[in-house]
Image (tube, rainbow, N blue to C red):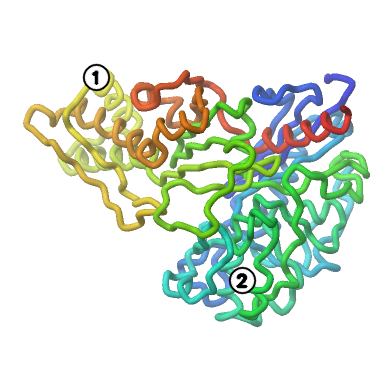
Amino acid sequence: MAAAGGFLLGLDLGTSSVKAVLLEAGAQRGAPVPTASASWATEAEVPPSGPAGPQGREQDAGRILRALGQCLGALPAGGLRRVRGIGVSGQMHGVMFWKSCQACTWTERGPHRIFEPQQVSHLITWQDGRCSGSFLASLPQPESHLSVATGFGSATIYWLLHHSPEFLKPYDRAGTIQDYVVAMLCGLQRPLMSDHNAASWGYFNAESRSWNSHILEESGFPTHMLPDIAEAGTIAGTTSHEWFGIPQGTRVGVALGDLQCSVYSCLSQSTDAVLNISTSIQLAASMPPGFKPAKRPDPLAPVAYFPYFNRTFLAVAASLNGGNVLATFVTMLAQWMRDLGLDVVESLIYSKMIQAALAQTDTQLTISPTLLGERHLPEELASVSSISPSALSLGHVSRALCRGIIQNVHAMLPSQQLKEWGIDRLIGSGSALTRNEVLRQEVEKAFPFSISYGQDVDAAAGAALVMLRESAREAS
């Protein structure tokens, strides 16, 4: 079924689903074609515990692991027995807690051994909103080029320390959900955390690759809970037990960020940039070796720099306004029609909207589509300008809306800046871009590069490819 070299297993523990892929050991980076893959919805959302209130966002770690088990159970048993490396990525920023000596139990489940969580908290996710602006302003200033926001692990721990200190008492370790999985697989008493995930928590200095320990300790932060730091792409350990047929002693990489793994799955050259348009938008490019971001965070900057691989950084313009804006527009039209006594399904409205926009190749109408604001401009609202009687058709409005979505992300990270960084090709991916020819036309107008479509980002495949790279490096 595969080359003699066996397989690499990639796992991604996402916000709403888990994915697992088996990748042949001879696969080529930049064109990962999994031999087998499976995904499973986690359905892990639970009411927030304690005083977090409706702003809290929590998930049941046990449900996430059961979804992971469903994915592994759907993969070929013969392939799992030949896995020689496991790469793990997952949702960033979030935090969960566990007791180091009692964090899981290994049990027999059918023909395999699995681990089940014990003495663990809920996962408080990146979507958590319990840290208000005033609370964040009361925290010590980090020594980092990245700002701290609500949903970031360190900010959540500060909040618990101030509002629910008894919550922390049963635990002595903390990490992301993917850090927990790696620690349990490898039997690590003290978890390891990649610089990907550490930077997403805040209070991490990417240049020295270390926590802001002195700042945290002086403010009473429980630093004993923090994981040790490991460079992204390194090996965390080996499996301490057979797991779903995967042999004991199989190498496991330190857990990675899903953003970086998604980009890595299709960014085959340093001269490529990735534009992913789904619900939201990410435009990302790897920075050249030696690049260093500013030492202090700039909350008004539209581009953030995240640790990537080989001690480089990934420049990311992450817009909150993508396919969700088009979906809101379609929902609005559907509601107007219902108000007029007509009932039209939204899929038909979307199809007609795209047809009208394709027929209307240009428009003077201008739409700024920032319905949700942006992280660097949270108070920004959407607007429409240059309105005239001749520019009120569905075609004009739909064309202007698609153009506005692309122009918005282009304003955050202009094509001229990408050229200065040496970018000469754009990899276009994401469900919204795939199904919308008008968006693709506007991308090609805004970004004067060679553009390649058809390869969607895949964090699980990216995690497997990182392990492939490490295997190749050791072999050489």
Q: Residue at x 65, y 25 (%)?
A: 30
Q: Which quadrant does the N terminus fall into?
A: top right
61 left or right of 422 in image: right
Report x, y in % for residue 210: 70, 60
Q: Dot 1: within a 10 Å radius of its alpha carbon, few (fewer than 14), some, or many (20 or more) residues?
A: some
Query: As displayed, is residue 358 above or below residue 92?
Result: above
Q: CA distance from mark 1 to mark 2?
A: 51 Å
User: The residue tagged with tag 1: helix, strand or loop?
Assistant: loop
Q: Residue at x 20, y 35 (%)?
A: 366
Q: Quadrant of residue 335?
A: top left
Residue sticking out furthest to the left? 389
Query: As displayed, is residue 4 above or below residue 258?
Result: above
Q: Which residue occupies the foreground of this view, 175 or 310?
A: 310
Report x, y in % for residue 300: 39, 55
Disc on the earlier residue, 1 or 2: 2
Q: How many marks?
A: 2
Q: Which residue is mark 1?
A: 361
Q: Dot 2: within a 10 Å radius of its alpha carbon, few (fewer than 14), some, or many (20 or more) residues?
A: many
Report x, y in % for residue 234: 79, 44
Q: Which residue occupies the foreground of this view, 109 or 452?
A: 452
Amino acid type at image mark 2: Ile
Q: Quadrant of residue 270?
A: top right
Report x, y in % for residue 203: 61, 64
Q: Which residue occupies the foreground of this view, 16 or 215?
A: 215
Amino acid type at image mark 1: Thr
Q: Residue at x 53, y 61 (%)?
A: 151
458 left or right of 350 in image: right
Q: Which residue is mark 2?
A: 157
Q: Which quadrant does the C terminus fall into?
A: top right
191 left or right of 142 in image: right
User: The residue tagged with tag 2: helix, strand or loop?
Assistant: helix
Q: Are marks 1 and 2 in contact (CB under 8 Å)?
A: no
